[in-house]
Image: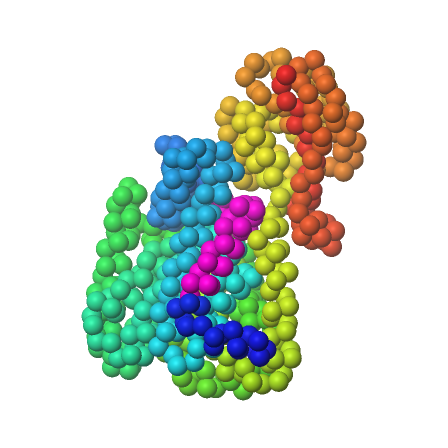
Amino acid sequence: MPQWARRFLRAKSLLQHFWIALICGLALRVLCAIFVYGPQALDDYKHGVWPAYQFFAGQPMDLPDYRSHLLIWILAAFIRVGSWIGLTSALAQVRMMYLGLGLVSTLGLWGTFLFVKSFRSKVFGATALYLVALFPLMPFISTRAFGEAVAMSFVMLGFGILESARRTGNRKLWVWIAGFASLGVAVLFRFHVGLLFLSYGLILIYLRCWPGVMGGVIAGFLTLGAEWLVDFLSGKVAFGTLIAYLAANEGGAAQYGVSPWYNTWLFVIALTLAPFSFIFWKKLKPLWRQHWPWLVPLLVYVLAHSLVPHKEERFLYPIVGIELWALAWVWAASAYMKPARVMYSRVMIGLSIPLLLIVCFVNTQEGEIEPPAYSEANFHDVVYLDYKSLFGQSLIRFYFLRPPSELKEIEADGLTANKIDEVLEGSGHHRAVVLLTSEPGARAELHALEGIRTVDSQCHNMRTSGSVIDRLLYKMNPKHNMRRRPTWYLVCERL
């Protein structure tokens, strides 16, 4: 670790580092929520953002029985807060959801503070705080509408309380209940977190930490009661969500895709910035010797996910925070090692800045959702004349395509001024016509309409949606990255 970094970490109290990390981490999450509103995958919109809007709007929810309503209620609450201050567009609402999730994620930073405050090493404590706040992947994870992302913060809070109690010999039952209850909340968002809950409880039995065991038993019953209550309020039978989830994922969810067993381990290793992190291998033994009680649950969780056929990186989101604790420990323990200073520290710090800029400002799959997000936010009621655009083919277009707006599929020869007037004449309420395509060959038709005035409209300049990363991925492998194509669109506003 560079000398200037060690000097900075030692110059302030741990509480001061906590507040600095909190402010910086929250700022990054706000930026990510505002600028990166695109989907990571289909599920974050289909099973999070969209049903949350439906619940807010009083509509029947398109939500499978194996999905908990808890996340939906929370996201809908964020939309309602936004409505109080006049944020009603689809874009503003998804940003409010992500802002709310970013705020919830600060619980993980609080948990980290509770975890490290009993350690003598100020360098380790501060490093852990800054990794949780500023590690490039954290702002993105923290603002995604996945149950796993929310679970991550409660896992850190739970282990922060539990490990602080174990290390200091705290025998107050309410403290242990609070720690396990936090893990229980994480279980409500991601059932697999039960592996962390149960494995840590077994470790406390092995250590004969009976106040902790009793706290775990009580919190376990509280968790079961909370799950029953969520199902009851959702109109389901007791534990109906869990039963449906187990049925839908029978056989390891192989029907959704199969990946090699080592994929989960590759993700875990990649988080440490391997292969540069391999220089810490000598510190792994003391790390294990001193911290095995919370490392065992982490390894159990990763191992279990490596055994199921279907794997996605988001399944491991709940343990990302505690893995960063382990990384902070070996990094701080290697602070005076020259290879660590020369290789790892420079690479980590050197990559973090550009990666944070990408994570916080580069939208994902922008070509698919940016045209309707912009049009709906600025004109509200529009007609989309779509010629093979990503939005027209999108599986999440239902979120941005809101009545009275509508989408009409046309051929390339329909991208004309006459067609614009025809649409506007046929409807007296649409404020604009949006022509859009993802076919490069049709771009010239839109370009020819830039700035023209038709009988009923004034056309603006053609816009191109598609982030730098999307375009790079599409250029590298067009066949497998069709959803990363750019989309060209032109707004013609009614006079």
- Side of 111 relative to 356 (left or right): left
- Side of 182 relative to 33 (left or right): left
Q: Is residue 196 above or below residue 23?
A: below
As for residue 20 lying within the magenta part, the answer is yes
Picture residue at 44% right of the left edge, 60% below the top: 22
Mark yes or no: residue 326 visible: no
Give the image quarter of residue 215. bottom left
Please state, as top left, top right, bottom left or bottom right, where the C terminus lies in the image.
Answer: top right
x and y percentages locating residue 449 in the rendered image: 75, 25
Q: Looking at this view, is 35 or 245 the one in front?
A: 35
Give the image quarter of residue 424. top right
Please state, as top left, top right, bottom left or bottom right, where the N terminus lies in the image.
Answer: bottom right
x and y percentages locating residue 67 in the rendered image: 39, 48
Picture residue at 56% right of the left edge, 62% below the top: 136
Give the residues in magenta.
18-47
- Side of 199 relative to 11 (left or right): left
Q: Looking at this view, is 426 or 93 the one in front?
A: 93
Q: Main secondary structure of the magenta part?
A: helix
Picture residue at 33% right of the left edge, 53% below the top: 243
